[in-house]
């Protein structure tokens, strides 16, 4: 069992606080590191990998600090976000290079095995410049797997992939997790995390905003005040009726054509609006959430 612990971890670059007093415990299985751009996800992954020293606090794997610890490096595979690889190499040469850097006893064999794990054996002799985005991501994963690490850290591994490539990568990560590895991947897309992560850690503006299984995070995100734009056959009457409902905080007409409603939580409002409309013979044409951007969800989590 490999456990990754961050204790009171901060990292600043000059005046910029990229990671602010984060405490996290990550066990085997897949953990999604979810947050908008600039939240500090890459900085956190680099510190977990031991490549970047925290400005304060400690990062440990099974109780041992990751920083400047060669024995620990052998347990970690990092798949960085950078797209550019050594495009002039074949996939096999690239993966083998990493096996040699990791001082694996039989680098050629290790490279072949890792390439097999990501199902790239058929394309291993082709130059990386001929690979699709999904293939490039997979060969990067193979290179991070040459030394059979217990911990695999991936920075935005699904970026730019089409749905088939994404599904394939998800299946691979799930398979690696079933082998008992501890896998952490970063993403700014909720649905990606929902599909494969057992545990979700949300970071916003360098702070650890929430932690839990996906259902818990989803609940946090939906049980918040929500705003909607509603169009109906009688907006004025609907506004008055909705205001009488306990879950509705506010309703006001927007011009002559729509109604803006603020409700306490998504679940309550989703039940109330069809009932009120039906009971009063009002036809509802449209209900659109107006503040569902990830940023608004995240800022709610940070401030709650
Ligand atoms: N080398 C650096 N020098 C100065 N500031 C940096 C450096 N690296 C990161 N930052 C800043 O630290 C903050 C966190 O960046 P980080 O790349 O860790 O976030 P992220 O969540 O991975 O974002 P993205 O998804 O956009 O890569 C940002 O404000 C970023 O501008």
Image (tube, rainbow, N blue to C red):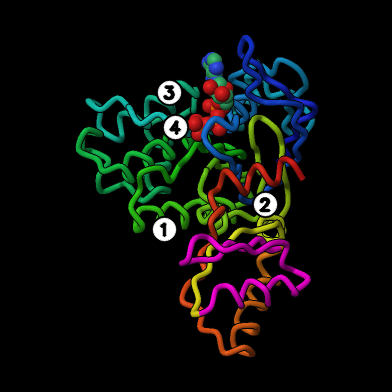
For residue 215, say whether it is visible: no
As drawn, 303 above or below 194: above
Asked whether the residues under the numbered discs 4 and 1 touch, taking CB atoms below 8 Å apart as contact, a structural biologist would say no
| The residue stretch that appears in magenta | 234-263
Q: Disc 2 marks which residue?
A: 199
Q: Disc 4 marks which residue?
A: 81
Residue 100 circle label:
3
Q: Position of residue 140 (x, y in %)?
A: 40, 36
Please say whether residue 44 is one of the residues in the magenta stretch: no
At numbered mark 2, what does the secondary structure look like: helix, strand or loop?
Answer: strand
Counting residues from the start of the chain, the first of labels 3 and 2 encountered is 3
Q: Quadrant of ligand 1?
A: top right
Which residue lies at the image location 35% right of the left edge and 53% below the top edge?
A: 165
Which residue lies at the image location 66% right of the left edge and 49% below the top edge?
A: 200
As drawn, 102 above or below 298: above
As drawn, 282 above or below 174: below
Counting residues from the start of the chain, the first of labels 2 and 4 encountered is 4
């Amino acid at each position: 069992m490999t456990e990754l612990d961050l204790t009171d971890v901060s990292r600043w670059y000059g005046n910029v606080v990229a990671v602010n007093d984060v405490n996290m415990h990550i066990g085997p299985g897949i953990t999604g590191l979810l947050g908008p751009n600039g939240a500090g996800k890459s900085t956190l992954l680099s510190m977990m990998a031991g490549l970047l020293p925290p400005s304060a606090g400690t990062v440990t794997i099974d109780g041992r600090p990751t920083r400047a610890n060669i024995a620990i490096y052998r347990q970690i595979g990092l798949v960085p976000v950078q797209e550019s690889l050594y495009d002039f190499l074949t996939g096999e040469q690239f993966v083998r290079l990493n096996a040699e850097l990791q001082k694996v006893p039989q680098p050629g064999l290790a490279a072949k095995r890792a390439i097999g794990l990501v199902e790239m054996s058929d394309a291993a002799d082709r130059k990386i410049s001929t690979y699709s985005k999904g293939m490039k991501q997979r060969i990067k994963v193979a290179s991070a797997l040459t030394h059979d690490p217990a911990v695999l850290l991936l920075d935005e591994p699904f970026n730019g992939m089409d749905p088939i490539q994404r599904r394939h990568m998800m299946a691979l990560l799930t398979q690696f997790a079933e082998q008992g590895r501890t896998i952490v991947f970063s993403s700014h897309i909720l649905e990606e995390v929902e599909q494969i992560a057992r545990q979700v850690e949300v970071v916003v503006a360098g702070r650890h905003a929430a932690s839990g299984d996906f259902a818990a995070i989803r609940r946090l995100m939906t049980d918040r005040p929500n705003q909607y734009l509603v169009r109906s056959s009688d907006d004025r009457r609907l506004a008055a009726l909705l205001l009488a409902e306990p879950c509705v905080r506010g309703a006001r007409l927007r011009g002559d054509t729509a109604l803006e409603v603020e409700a306490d939580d998504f679940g309550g409002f989703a039940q109330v609006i069809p009932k009120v409309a039906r009971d009063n013979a009002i036809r509802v044409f449209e209900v659109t959430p107006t503040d569902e951007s990830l940023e608004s969800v995240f800022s709610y989590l940070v401030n709650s």
